[in-house]
Image (cartoon, helix red, strand yellow):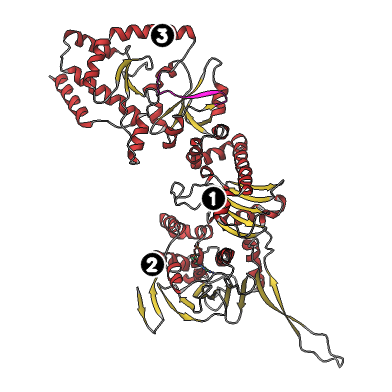
């Protein structure tokens, strides 16, 4: 809401979340306030990137000098100013960008801050989250921003004391870009009691001192690609004059560049500290946690490129959002070209963050060109290879971290298994981890499973369920348990899809135990079992037919099987039909395919069937038979999908049966 004061001066209220954020900034105790400079420089660097991107597509866009960031400080006035000649902002953009929350990181930050005692949380959190522009209020009690959007004549002046409102007015600025002036809070060494309750609002460092600024810039922003300049005045005492009198001191003004600006990916690995990699990761990803792995890449050959990639340690909240920001930053010979270059990473590696510097690409490359560019294709292949080999190495040598990684990103990698390239699939399968019937809660790899397989076992057996725990309880596993055969358990929605394809890994087919017939044991054993089963099928054939009639709406067939040892019944899928779980998933996604009925299999050795068979022999029209059929079907469905398919019919059958048992 804006109140007009003069013609173009308006007072606005901050959005509620911003007020909370500002409140945290202003009252944060003992936090690492130095990071305010990192945040403002990082915004300037982004603004210069944006300008460079605009200029790449439109040569007529003006350029106010060479792109740079300037820091200036005034010790007497206690102000520090950060200026850039980047894109700048229009008045509307200022209102939109400064004063309302757009990015999810800020919301996360607030949620995390709320989740714990404020005092405990703020010190670490503020330092860890990129809270951007508002961090200025950690050190300043008044902030003024003057900005002019490239191509516009009027500048906009924004000003606030962080008290819930800000003013905005027209102004002037020489050239496009943004200047932010911070009026610093008093220092704790200034007059007043340093231990009083307001101590947290006072500064421990003098941010107008050259060395303080140099120190902070070197620590957090050394890799920023644009020069960060500062003018410093040096006073040198002059030599005595010939007469022996004191001469006026010599004053020199130097324009220093505070950052080395050396692209971090151009430096050799041994020269870069972990801390520097971490800062750089934070700069490009806006992730406040340290990366799980840092992957420097040097591509040589026909096309040269250098890259620096990172594996995050935690999945971002938008990982499954189609709008997710993904892809790598693209540079050409250290000049920023574009953000989120999707052409460099396939969707199943979309969590990878990083930069790629392609040496032989044109600076004016557009997204359309990128899609067809051979060079990009070659670079992408190398990068994918490197990510894969890094993950493979982690899987072998750093199991704990790999397990953490897999829990966060496994489902995304498995999306890659839906592709049609078999050799690529085999490489991805090599990365897959699964729960196992061998030990509850443990993750294992396909490779380890294959190594443990007895020589005569022909396939890799897997089962999907709504959770690993639910899958582990499935009646479908009973014969496997009896025969001591390990089965891998999968519970991510994507598993339904790739397992359907019966891919091969190390020459062994991946077979879902919930599908069709499963062949276990030796040829002779199988033959014997098949004969025994055929006998049972004959023995119960009339009863099975009776069940089929009662369940004709729900199942395709009712047959005996030797899958189970203790359960009475289970549901399986025949041939190529989608499994009941997959059908339910597709229905939830609004793409309900034609319902394919499952097969109800019963365990002929279960004591229940001898009894039911007796009832059936006494009278094929005994009303209990319909109840048994309903309840068996529901039980089997619950263990498969976790859901009762027709609750009304099930409840009715159950209460009828209870009534009979009770009378
Ligand atoms: P973030 O930079 O993480 O998006 P900030 O709160 O730091 O969040 O900034 C909000 C927005 O304000 C930025 O996304 C950008 O659009 C704009 N902005 C901030 N600083 C500048 C600047 N120096 N030049 C141009 N735009 C800026």
Q: Which residues are magenta?
A: 505-516
Relative to residue 347, is residue 579 drawn left or right?
left
Residue at image mark 1: 342
Decide: marks 3, 1 in contact (CB < 8 A)? no
Circle number at residue 579: none
Tag 2 secondary structure: loop
Q: Position of residue 95 (x, y in %)?
A: 43, 71
Residue at image mark 2: 15
**Distance from Cα at disc 2 to Cα at disc 1:** 33 Å
- Above or below for 15 versus 628: below
Residue 512 is one of the magenta-drawn residues: yes
Q: Position of residue 659 (x, y in %)?
A: 14, 22
Relative to residue 257, is residue 101 drawn left or right?
left
Residue at image mark 3: 529
Q: Position of residue 18 (x, y in %)?
A: 42, 66
- Above or below for 386 versus 109: above
Mark yes or no: residue 120 visible: no
Decide: marks 2, 3 in contact (CB < 8 A)? no
Mark 1 surroundings within 10 Å by alpha-carbon count, few (fewer than 14), some (14 through 19), many (20 or more): some
Please tell me whether mark 3 or mark 1 is closer to you in this view: 1
Q: Position of residue 42 (x, y in %)?
A: 57, 64
Nearer the observer, 395 or 383:
383
Mark 2 and mark 1 lie on one chain; the one further toward the N terminus is 2
Mark 3 surroundings within 10 Å by alpha-carbon count, few (fewer than 14), some (14 through 19), many (20 or more): some
Counting the numbered discs, the total is: 3
Residue at the image point whose x is 60% and y is 59% from the top: 337
**Distance from Cα at disc 3 to Cα at disc 1:** 54 Å
- Above or below for 599 versus 327: above
Tag 1 secondary structure: helix
Mark yes or no: residue 59 visible: yes
């Amino acid at each position: 809401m804006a109140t007009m004061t003069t013609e173009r001066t308006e007072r606005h209220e901050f959005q509620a979340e911003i007020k909370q954020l500002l409140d945290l900034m202003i009252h944060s105790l003992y936090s690492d306030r130095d990071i305010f400079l990192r945040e403002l420089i990082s915004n300037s660097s982004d603004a210069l990137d944006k300008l460079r991107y605009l200029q790449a597509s439109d040569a007529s866009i003006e350029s106010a000098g060479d792109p740079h960031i300037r820091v200036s400080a005034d010790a007497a006035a206690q102000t520090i100013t950060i200026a850039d000649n980047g894109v700048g902002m229009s008045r509307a953009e200022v209102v939109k960008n400064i004063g309302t929350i757009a990015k999810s990181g800020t919301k996360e930050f607030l949620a995390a801050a709320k989740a714990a005692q404020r005092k405990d949380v703020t010190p670490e959190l503020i330092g860890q989250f990129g809270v951007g522009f508002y961090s200025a209020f950690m050190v300043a009690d008044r902030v003024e921003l003057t900005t002019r959007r490239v191509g516009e004549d009027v500048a906009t002046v924004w000003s606030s004391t962080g008290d819930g409102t800000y003013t905005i007015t027209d102004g002037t600025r020489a050239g496009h870009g943004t200047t932010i002036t911070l009026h610093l809070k008093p220092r704790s060494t200034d007059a007043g009691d340093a231990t009083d309750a307001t101590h947290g609002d006072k500064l421990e460092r003098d941010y107008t001192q050259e060395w303080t600024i140099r120190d902070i810039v070197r620590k957090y922003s050394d890799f920023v690609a644009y020069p960060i300049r500062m003018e410093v005045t040096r006073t040198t005492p002059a030599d005595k004059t010939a007469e022996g009198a004191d001469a006026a001191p010599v004053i020199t003004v130097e324009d220093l560049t505070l950052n080395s600006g050396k692209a971090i990916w151009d430096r050799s690995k041994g020269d870069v500290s972990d801390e520097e990699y971490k800062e750089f990761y934070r700069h490009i990803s806006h992730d406040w946690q340290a990366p799980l792995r840092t992957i420097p890449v040097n591509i040589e050959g026909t096309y040269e490129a250098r890259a620096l990639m990172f594996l995050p340690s935690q999945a971002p909240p938008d990982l499954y959002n189609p709008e997710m920001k993904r892809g790598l930053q693209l540079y050409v010979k250290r000049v920023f070209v574009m953000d989120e270059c999707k052409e460099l990473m396939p969707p199943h590696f979309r969590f990878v963050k990083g930069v790629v510097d392609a040496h032989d690409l044109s600076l004016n490359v557009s997204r359309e060109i990128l899609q067809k560019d051979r060079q990009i294709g070659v670079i992408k292949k190398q990068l994918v290879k490197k990510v894969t080999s890094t993950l493979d190495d982690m899987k072998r040598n750093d199991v704990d971290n790999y397990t953490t990684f897999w829990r966060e990103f496994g489902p995304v990698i498995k999306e890659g298994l839906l592709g049609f390239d078999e050799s690529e699939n085999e490489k991805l399968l090599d990365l897959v981890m699964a729960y196992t019937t061998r030990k509850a809660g443990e993750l294992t790899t396909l490779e380890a499973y294959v190594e443990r397989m007895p020589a005569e076992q022909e396939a890799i057996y897997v089962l999907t369920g709504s959770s690993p725990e639910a899958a582990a309880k499935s009646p479908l596993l009973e014969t496997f348990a009896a025969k001591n055969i390990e089965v891998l358990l999968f519970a991510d929605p994507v598993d339904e899809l790739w397992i359907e394809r019966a891919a091969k890994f190390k020459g062994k087919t991946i077979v879902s135990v919930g599908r069709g017939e499963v062949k276990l044991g030796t040829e002779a054993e199988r033959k014997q079992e098949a004969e025994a089963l055929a006998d049972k099928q004959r023995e119960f054939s009339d009863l099975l037919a009776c069940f089929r009639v009662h369940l004709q709406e729900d199942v395709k067939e009712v047959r005996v099987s030797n899958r189970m040892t203790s359960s009475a019944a289970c549901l399986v899928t025949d041939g190529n039909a989608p499994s009941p779980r997959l059908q339910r998933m597709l229905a939830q996604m609004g793409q309900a395919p034609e319902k394919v009925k499952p097969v109800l299999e019963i365990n002929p050795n279960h004591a229940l069937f001898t009894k039911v068979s007796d009832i059936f022999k006494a009278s094929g029209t005994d009303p209990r038979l319909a109840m048994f059929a309903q309840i068996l079907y529901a039980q089997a469905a619950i263990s498969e999908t976790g859901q009762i398919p027709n609750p009304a019919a099930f409840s009715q059958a159950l209460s009828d049966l209870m009534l009979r048992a009770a009378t």
